[in-house]
Image: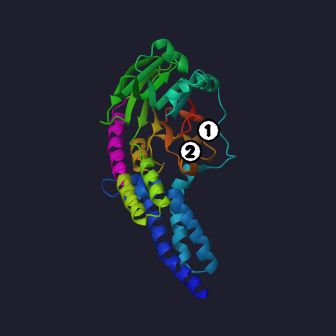
Amino acid sequence: MAALRFFFYLLMIPAALGFAFLGLAGVLAPFTDPNTWWVPAFSGLFMPVILAGNIFLLFFWGFHKKRWVILPLLAIGLNYNYLISSFQWPWKKIPQSIQNKNNLIIASYNIEGFYSIAHSSNKYSLARLVEKKNIDILCLQEHCEESNADSTLIFRRTGLPFRAVFFNRRTDWAVFGITIYSRYPIVRMGKIDFGSERNAAMWADIKVNEHDTIRIINNHLQTTDISLNRKKFNEYKSIKNWHGQARVLVTLLEQLKNNFQIRAHQAQQVRQVVDTTKYPIILCGDFNDTPISYAYNHVKGNDFGDGFRNCGQGYGHSFNGIKGLLRIDFIAYQPWFRGIEYTSPHLPWSDHNPVIMKLAL
C-alpha cells in the first residue's frame, strides 16, 4: 500500500506540469489563431475540465505542503477571464429597467427542434415565448420549415411580422438555415456565406424607430459535431476494444483541430462585416465555442460588451450537453447600447437554451 501511495504521489508531478501547461495555454486562446497554434483553442474548449484538474492538484499539493502547489495556483489565477466569463455573482446588482421607447428585447436561439415544435400538438409555442418575453428581435439558428410554407403560417409561428432569411440548404420538402425575425421593419439584409450547408451567418438592418437603424448579425459558426465519434467510442467500449477507442480519440482530436481552424476563418469573415458597418451592432448566435475562444473574441474585439458578463448572474451556460458546462451562445453589443437584463431559460425544445437580453439604445 505504501508503494502504491508513493507511485500516486509521483504521478501527481507530471499531472501538475500537464494541467498547468494546458491552463496557461488557455490564457492565450482568445488571441491565438488556431491556424497558427491550435493547442490554446483546445484548452479553451476544455477549460472546465482543466480547471477542475488544477483545483484538485491545488488541494493535493497544498495538503502535502510542496512547492508544486504554485503551478495549479498560477493556472487558476491566470484564467480569471474565463472564470468571470462563466460565473457572475448571483446577487450582483443589475441596472434597473427604465421603460422607454428605446428599450429593445432580443433573443438568440439555436432551435434544432423548430420543425418539431411547429408540428407538435402544442403548436406555436415559440410565438407564446415571443409574447411572454415581449421579444422584439428573434435570431434563430438551425431553422427548418416546409418549402411551401405561406406567409400566414410563418407569421403565426413567431408572431413577428418581418423577417430576413438565409436558407443555405434546400430539399424537396424543406429549407434549412438561419433567420432574423423582427417587430420592426427590416430595411436591408445580407448573407455571410461560409460555403457550408450547415453553418452560415447573416445580417439585417432594422429601423427600430423614426431616427435609429441598428444592425443585427446572426451567426452559426462551424459545428463541433462530436456525436458520431462518441457513438463509435461507446460501441468500442462496450466490446472492450481499446485499440478502436484510441483510434476514435485520435480522429476526434483531429476533427476538433479542423473545426477550430474553420471557425477562425468564419470569424474573420464576420469581423470584416463588423468593421465596414456604420450602424450600431448587436452580435448574436451559436459560436460553438467558449467565451475565451479565438472565434468569439475575434468577432467581438474590444468594442463589444458581453451580455452575460455585464448583466448575467450565477453560472452561465447555454448548451445542455456535456453536463451543461459550456456557454457557446452569445449576445454582445456595442457602447451605443446599455445592457439591462440577461436570461437564458431552460426550454425542452433544443439542446441549447435561448439567450434573451433587454437593451436600451
Residue receiving disc 1: 346
Task: Find residue 266 and report its horizontal and vertical position in percent.
Answer: 34, 41
Mark 2 → mark 1, Cα distance in angstroms:
9 Å
Residue at 53% from the left image edge and 83% from the top image edge: 7
Under mark 2, the amino acid is Asn
Residue at 59% from the left image edge and 68% from the top image edge: 56
Task: Find residue 142 and report its horizontal and vertical position in percent.
Answer: 45, 33
Q: Is residue 313 left or right of residue 17?
A: right
Quarter of the image for the N terminus: give it: bottom right
Q: Nearer the viewer, residue 8 or 98?
A: 8
Give the SS element for disc 1: loop
Q: Residue 15 lies in magenta, yes or no?
A: no
Give the SS element for disc 2: loop
Task: Find residue 271 and report its horizontal and vertical position in percent.
Answer: 36, 39
Q: Is residue 192 left or right of residue 134?
A: left
The residue range painted magenta reads 257-277
Q: Residue 261 lies in magenta, yes or no?
A: yes
Report whether residue 33 is seen. no
Query: Image quarter for residue 218?
Result: top left
Residue receiving disc 2: 320
Task: Find residue 34 and report its horizontal and vertical position in percent.
Answer: 34, 53
Residue at the extreme front of the image, as rendered: 239
Report whether residue 270 is seen. yes
Mark with earlier residue (2, 1): 2
Q: Nearer the viewer, residue 150 or 28?
A: 150
- Crowding at label 1, few (<14), some or many (≥20) Cα neighbours within 10 Å? some
Q: Nearer the viewer, residue 292 or 198?
A: 198
